[in-house]
Image (spheres, rainbow, N blue to C red):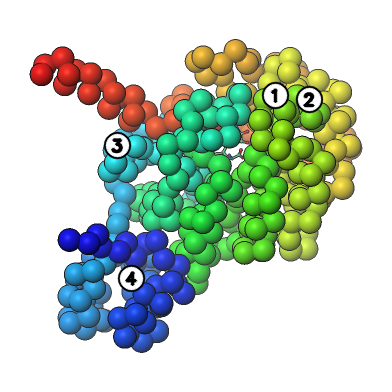
Amino acid sequence: MTEKTDLKNFPLPALELFLKGKGKERFRAIQIFKWIYQHGAGGFEEMTNISKDLRLELAETACISNLHAETVEEGSDGTRKYLFSLGDGSAVESVMIPDEGRATLCISSQVGCAMACEFCLTGNFRLTRNLTTAEIVNQIMAVRRDVEIRNIVFMGMGEPLHNLDNVIPAIQIMLDGNGLQLSNRRVTVSTCGLVPEMARLGREIPNVNLAVSLNATTDELRDRIMPVNRTYPLKALMKACKVFPLPGRRKVTFEYVMIGGINDSLEDAKRLLRLTSDVPNKVNLIPFNEHEGCGFKAPTRAAIDDFHKYLIDRNVTVITRDSRGGDISAACGQLKGKLEKRKTIETRSNGATE
Ligand code: SAH
């Protein structure tokens, strides 16, 4: 039997094409799209404004996938970490950060990551595989059943620009007025700095927010802690930020993970200011979250405050990100898909009884 086509991999134009191939009218695609994303339909039988014949025909060749959380952990600050099992043994995490009914969901784009940033836990796990478009949007669909989601940030596991073929259609579904109906100012793609892919994202989805994980102000240090810099050094990265198409007053976000004694001095702050002066921007300072097996340390409170003040005093928009979800390992760079660990243990114990 051939595998059924998962309709959640299709943005609306692709769904229209799929239905056209079956001789169906265009408006059917809009109806089905709305059923999937606005009513959260999990099967064709629910689609009551579609003829029974068409529903049966679709059910034979197509399906509507779903994700169910394997575990949900809630932190003392209301942050929730969802662990999703993907059916092939791998797992990804999403983090819901509440904010008075305007929750932000931090979603994953890959299982693991190939970018190998020295300070990042996900990077230690290497890339297992890309998430499909369906798996990306299903993280939102699943969490939305619990809480209304206002903002989406691609800051979970993986490098979204390393999986653009699936990330772009996922964003199209998010922004579609017949789909998830999110505003482009509420979707942020975060990258370690894949320069050609930044240009492609800007071409294909202009106006989506861009965040760039800068984390170092010299090529020497960035080469070391973010290997991507050896291919796309700071000069090329800054140029790509400068030409990224953003509407009017919108700014690029520079994320800067502050690592104690590595990149947290006032000299770094000074260089950061100089480096980014050409790009309308805001800066997110993220105190490094310590994790096992990584020798880096969090910066001191004083180092964070001095760095922050240096930039604020020079009219930079700066936010120092508090470590939301710290008590449930849901903070930046701490996601890794714990299920894999558990699976390994289960496999081992199975082995022992055989
Ligand atoms: N690959 C993308 C998105 C995932 S990482 C990117 O690089 O932007 C999301 C953010 O978490 C990045 O800014 C990254 O620099 C940061 N980060 C990774 N590990 C961290 C850690 N241990 N402590 C604090 N921030 C971390």
Q: CA distance from mark 2 to mark 1?
A: 7 Å
Q: Are marks 2 and 1 in contact (CB under 8 Å)?
A: yes
Q: Residue at x 19, y 69 (%)?
A: 60
The foreground one among 299 and 194 is 194
Image point 43% across, 41% down: which residue? 129
Q: Quadrant of the C terminus?
A: top left
Q: Mark 4 or mark 1, which is nearer to you? A: 1
Q: Which residue is mark 2?
A: 220
Image quarter where the N terminus lies is: bottom left
Which amino acid, mark 2? Glu
Separation of marks 4 and 3 at Cα, in angstroms: 29 Å
Describe the element under mark 3 as helix, strand or loop.
loop
Q: Earlier in the sequence, mark 3 or mark 1?
A: 3
As drawn, the label of residue 125 is none
The reply to whether the C-beta atoms of the residues labelled 4 and 3 are less than 8 Å apart is no
* Residue 269 image point, x, y percent: 83, 28
Task: State the residue in front, 254 or 295.
Answer: 295
In the rendered structure, find residue 89 and report the number of the disc placed on it: 3
User: In x, y percent, where is residue 96?
Assistant: 46, 42
Q: Quadrant of ligand 1?
A: top right
The Cα atoms of the two marked residues, 2 and 4, are separated by 52 Å
For residue 35, the mark is 4
